[in-house]
Every structure is written in structure tokens, then in C-alpha cells.
Image: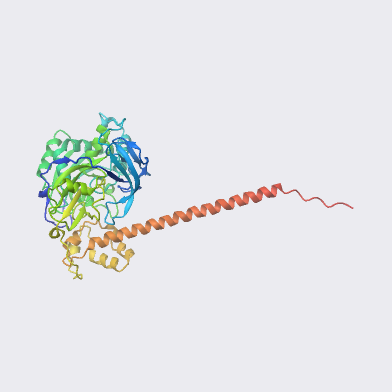
Amino acid sequence: MRLFSIRGGVHPQDQKSLSAERPIEPLPLPQLLHLPLQQHIGAAANPMVERRQQVAKGELIARAQGPVSAPIHAPTSGRIAGIGLYPANHPSGLSVRTISLQPDGEERWVEGLEGVADPFALEPEEIARRVAAAGVVGLGGATFPAAVKLNLRNRYELHRLVINGAECEPYLTCDDRLMREQAAAIVDGARIMAYALGVARIIIAIENNKPQAQQAMLNTAVGHGGLEIVGLPMHYPMGSEKHLVQTLTGQETPARGLTADIGVVVHNPATAFAVHQALRDGRPLIDRVVTITGGAISQPRNLRVPIGTRIETLIEASGGFAEPPARLVSGGPMMGQVISSARAPVIKGTNGILALTEAETRIREPSACIRCGKCVEVCPCGLVPLEMAALVRAGQPKRAVDAGLLDCISCGCCAYACPAHLPLVQYFVHAKGAMAERDRIKQKQTETKRLADQRTARMEAIKQAKRAAMAKRKPAAKPAASD
């Protein structure tokens, strides 16, 4: 298959060998699980349980709210310990509303979870409904509700499904191991999604540094027409959805558009595996594979982890620290987020926990921009990061937006290549977060004003109705007495 080149990009040092040969192991149940209500893109889930309530494994404990949302299910049986604030898996370390569950060790499944023997006999809408009910979201880190993507057939002319097995982040190996160990289930999940989308062609794209995963998928693909395994060059950020599609098709996704605009839908291998479990077994998304690695981890490994497990529990299960880490990161080193507290839980989008040494962090004291243009050269989106950074630092976010801020995919190539060690991507992430918060406040103010105006109109209508009623009750004036 012909591949097309993409602009920019970098070649960070590959550190996958730390954990790539470690098979996926199940993590023993922790003593307490913490399940944030907001662990996907869209509206937070709404809790359906109360403190001290007993729940079964797989039971719905928080219902999705709105069209873009995802429910949350109990990862095991036990007792609800509380619903309150708990540190988030986020650089801010701020607390978010969370359900805490104390496992009872019985692993007692909820009744009524049933799979489907032949998902291809279902209507596409029913497949999307079951995927939504299982709480499946994009497990590559995006956490977009998977069912919303499966319904894109209603609005776009689709022709292709791409399973994104690039896993271009230098340290992560969870997708690699999953493709090696669960190839048949991933292919099955991909075929179910392709059927739901109404597309006949599936491409499973894998970077060439994962030959065992490529071979496992090739062996499984035999006999499935319309399914192709494609090797990708090692080139960060090859795993970026838009750049992956450009590599495979030569077509560029419109600015601020979706790959569906050019007929392609992209899902992660772990998402395909979760769809397989949801349809074949009726199993909701209650755990996921996480890579625990980095130079400061004693025994790097890949673990199947119940959602809600504290990060510090994963570190303990990996032999603890070989040396004090300079930085803890959730996700990969290029696009991941610094963790402020190891008490934060694993959420659906957590694909890796990195404990990096000082040498690995490449932390340097930033100096003034020398306008060398390196950041422009490596930007895969064709932006001018040095200009955007100057505008952000000058407090001019609108002008930064005009310069392309919202087209930035936060891949980190600019910061990686910057000889002045400027934290460019951090500027952009901060600016985008501040703008999103401003938009939320503005939307809230608009909604508050709309409700206030409605109330004023309603009260005025009531007053007028009362005045009209009083006028009717008022006795007619007596005629003047005649002489």
C-alpha cells in the first residue's frame, strides 16, 4: 500500500524496550477504588448510588448525561464508601466529584449482562446503543464516547475504518502487548465497528517497531476480506489521528474538522477490544491495560488495571521506585500530563504511568527565543509556534487563535526541538484551557441571562393576568340617579 509523507515531526529516543516484552498481567484488587464522574469528553456522569450501598461487578453506578457522555460501572463488587471530592488525574491536582468503592473481594457480577452470539445480525443503531451502554470511550487517550463515532454514518459518507495501532509515544507498549495477545478480539471488534459504520474496508496501521504485533494481526486477518495490515514508518506524531489518515490516504483533514469529513473513522485497538467485550460478552468497560515504566520504576510492566485504582498502587505493584523520580507523567512523555499526586486514580483514558529520572525529563532552564525556526520546521500542522507563544505570553489569546492556536494538536514536537528549552506546548495547553474556561463562563452567563429574561417575562404575564382578572371582578359603575 502506498504511504504519503507528512510535514514536520521528530524522532524521540525509543524507550519501549523497558516494557515491550512484559506480557499483560492482572493487578490484584486494591482496597479502595476511586471513580471520577468526569473521565471522558462531554458531560460528567450522574451518580446512581448512595453511600453504603452494595453494588455488584459491572453494575451501573453513574448514568450518562446528554448525547456526548458515558456511563460508569462498578469495576468489582463491594460497598459504596462515599461520593465526594477526590484528587483528579490532572496536572492541576484539583479535586473532582468521585465515587469511592470498597471492594468485598467476591467479584460478584451483576445479573442481566448478556452478550450477542451474532452482532452482525443486529441493526447498526443497536450496536451503537450497546457500546454506549457499556461506557466505551476512546482508549488511546482521547476518551471520546465511542458510540458517538459509530453514529457518524448518519451524517457523513464513510468508506474506511482505521485502527490506530501506531502507538508512537516513546515509552508506551500497552497497545503493542494487546495486539500481540488479543489479536482475534481486536479484529472482531474492528469488524463489528465497520459493520456499524457501514464501511467495507478496515486498515489496521502499526508502526514498524512492533513486528510481533504486525505478525499477530496478519495471522488473524487471514480470511477476513477487506481487512489490511499496514506497517508505518517510525515518525512522531504518526499516532495523531489526522496525520495517520493523511499518511494512509494522502488526504488532509480540514482545519478544525473531523477525519469523517474525508470519509474515515479512526479508533484505537483497545477500543476495538472493548467493543468486542461489550457485544460478545455484554461486559462494560471496567478495566484497561496500563504501561508502568520509566527509568525510575524498578520493574516496568503492562498491567490490566481496574478503573479507579490509585496510581501509587500500580507503582507498588511494579516494585516501587528504583530511584526518586524527577517527574510522574500520566500518558506518554510527549503528550502526557504531569501528575501532581500519586493518589490520583487510573481513569478510562490512562494508557501509561511514567516515572522519569532527571536525565529522562530533559528539563532545562529556558532561555530567550533565538528565532531559529526549529519549532516551525517540526510542527506537523504547519503552524508558527514561536509566534503563537509570543502572543500567548503577551496576553493576546485571540490573536493566537488567529495564528492557529486551535489547530495545534499539543503533540510537543516544538518543545522537543526547541534549543532554548522553551515550554512551548505548555503555553498552548494553558491558553487553550483558559479559553475553554472563559467560554464555559460566558455560556453559563448567557444561559443565566436567558433564564432570568424568561422569568421576568413569566412574572409580567402573571401580573397582566391578575390585572385582567381584577378588572373583570370590579363592579360596573352605577348610572347617575335621574332627577
Q: Is residue 353 above or below residue 190?
A: below
Q: Is residue 309 above or below residue 108?
A: below
Q: Residue at x 32, y 66 (%)?
A: 396
Position of residue 281 measured from the top left corner of the image (x, y, whole percent): 25, 32
Q: Provide residue 148's location: percent of width, then percent of height.
A: 31, 43
Image colouring: rainbow
Q: Quadrant of residue 12?
A: bottom left
Q: Is residue 443 visible?
A: yes
Q: Is residue 207 left or right of residue 252?
A: left
State the image quarter where residue 263 is shown: top left
User: Which residue is the extreme one toward the right?
Assistant: 483
Return the residue found at the far top: 117
User: In the image, 332: left or right of 475?
Assistant: left
Figure quadrant of the N terminus: top left
Q: Using the image as rendered, state which of residue 29 and residue 397 is in the foreground.
A: 29
Query: Does the image show residue 71?
Result: no
- The residue at 83%/52% (across/down) is 480
Q: Residue at x 48, y 54 (%)?
A: 450
In x, y percent, where is residue 312?
21, 49
The image shows residue 353 at horizontal and vertical percentages of 19, 50
- Number of disc labels: 0
Q: Nearer the viewer, residue 290 or 460?
A: 290
